[in-house]
Image (tube, coloured by chain):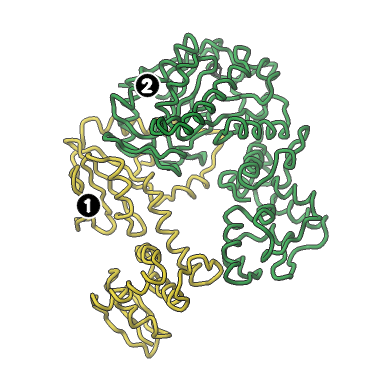
Amino acid sequence: MIDAERLKILTESAKYDVSCSSSGSRRKNEGGIGNASFGGICHSFTPDGRCISLLKILLSNRCAYNCLYCPNRAEADVPRASATPDEICELTMAFYKRNYIEGLFLSSAVEGSPDATMAKLVDTAVRLRKVYNFHGYIHLKGIPQADKALISRAGLYADRMSFNVELPAERSLRLLAPQKSREGILSPMKQLALEKAAVKEDTAKARKRFLPAGQTTQLIVGASPETDGQILKLSEALYRRFSLKRVYFSAYIPVVHHALLPDTCTGLLREHRLYQADWLLRFYGFTAEEIAPEGENLPEEYDPKCAWALRHMQFFPIEINKAPLEALLRVPGIGTLGAYKIVKARKFARLGFGDLAKMRIVLKRAKHFITCGGKFYGSENVTSVKNLLMLEERSGRYEQLSMFSTPETSLSALTGQL
Amino acid sequence: MNVYLTDGSEDCFYTAVFSACTDRDCVVTSARSLQLALGSTVLVVRADEEKCGRVKKKLQQYAPRSLADISLILRRDSPGKEQTALEYIRLIVQKKAPVGDMLSHPAVIAAREEKKKVTLEAHRFTGFLRFIEGEGGILYAPFAPDNDILELLLPHFLARFRGMPFIIHDTARGRAALYNGKECVVAETEKKVEIPLAEREAHFRALWKDYYEAVNIAARPHERQMKGYMPVRYWKFMPEKQ
Ligand code: SF4
């Protein structure tokens, strides 16, 4: 049985992986314990405001690699530990039964070789499914450069897998994670995407579930000089080429001092702006180029949708009772939920400004960009609109903490309503 | 003004609706602590199979999904729930059609908000419910939800823990679902039950608390967000918050 000390070492190191979601899978309970819930379930929240859904843990933090930004790199002097597949299985089962978690997110440092590490990860997943009869959620981290057959096999037992792209540009990766290569990370992602597509095509195999919740990845923001525009362009390509479910961003936190690394934390605000932009890419019909040209960063003063709208005032105001869904989605402050509500409601009754408020659609930004039954309630003057939007973002006692973002921004980065 | 006083059950509510639907300024409620307006008449309603059946049949005909919506609204812990449901039914009867998409209509807005509170709480408890392993392996989960959601949670846990005996106990209402691995019944119970713990229980509880502590990023406190998603009143039965 795993003891408290090893548990601490192995989870402390895993916590900076930001993906926590347990969504995307409909795995059924086939005569054992557990199933997956398609929308995902949060089981607890930590004082940093993040959700706990999966038991996030490493098999081992003994690493053969030397990624500069990582506290577990080979050269670092930190306490080391590893766990056996059975120890992980046992802990997962015990936590699951008590409804502490939705499943397991298993990762590992490169202990020995990539193949040996990947084999141990896969072995744990296979055991959970076959020996422990576990049908809950499993997210496996992929080890770059591991054998293709192992990666395929993982896809048969895991709900989701992720290979972390880590740094937005190949140059930075070479510099900061010398043993990793862009190719070594992207090619297994491609392999899994192709295999998943092939299983989908083949109806005979369709019952053999393959990675039902797809793949995700993570990018560290601020450890290297890439701009938001580059990061978004890369995300867009990853969504398109590998049908990724989610790209996660992790604001850089310096845990290691090194001449090649910045000594300061990347502001949470930047991370939140990127998440907002990411929602725009996935659900609002924006392209990366529209949100931020490649050499540019996202503005800090207002969210990326506001920024776009302010650059395109010629499209506004739009009439709430007539505008097509695509246009509604581009109005600052009207999120996907709001836009769908408007489209449904206006079939029955003409909507006025008051109706929108009653429907809980937030209007403080939107009012400058819409008319309701021909009436305009915002400000005509673009400069004053800019100022109004900016002031509102900066308001409150959070002003002095420019590193942190406002509660409103952080909420919108999470829910994707902007 | 007539005040229809129901016993809180669905059948009794529909029986009241039979008359209340066309009784313009009436109030339907099951709340016992009621401020009566001057000149109001209290009518104590007893469930009547025929009246209840006729109302349900009409609703079934006009808006088949509305019965499920109303059942959710009636699970709310709020004195106005019957009135909200009544206004919603009146609109359906007036339109002779489903009204769920009339999102700017006040009756629909109110109904959706009440329903949302119930379904949201049920969803939250699929995550926040905590089982304790008792002697002999039985799993026991006490909780005290705002709304009456015990039955809404059952399908989830019956599918997930199929074949594993468990008890889910609403300590606020004194009701529990008892599952022996094959059948599940809901029964009235005491509000407090003592369960002898399994040997390993304390060990895994302690590990879970350690885990909870270890995954937190202390450099980025955001208590407000934590409490927003996981209200303090739910912490009572969560070991990581003890
Ligand atoms: S491979 Fe790199 S990032 Fe992963 S544990 Fe080893 S040093 Fe850290």
| Residue bearing mark 1 | B192
Q: Is residue B213 above or below residue B170?
A: above
Which colour represents chain A? Answer: green
**Residue A56 visible at all:** no
**Which three-letter amino acid code belongs to the residue tagged 2?**
Thr
Res. A208 image quadrant: top left
What is the crowding at mark 2: few (fewer than 14 residues within 10 Å), some, or many (at least 20)?
many
* Quarter of the render that holds ligand 1: top right
Q: Which residue is depicted at the point 70% across and 48% down?
A: A305
Would the CB of label 1 be found within 8 Å of ligand 1? Answer: no
Q: Which residue is depicted at the point 38% across and 81% down?
A: B21
Residue farthest to the bottom?
B39
Q: Do callouts 2 and 1 point to residues on the same chain?
A: no
Name the side, left or right, on which A264 lies relative to B146. Answer: right
Q: Residue A124, labelled with which disc?
A: 2
Between marks 2 and 1 in the image, the one whose residue lies nearer the viewer:
2
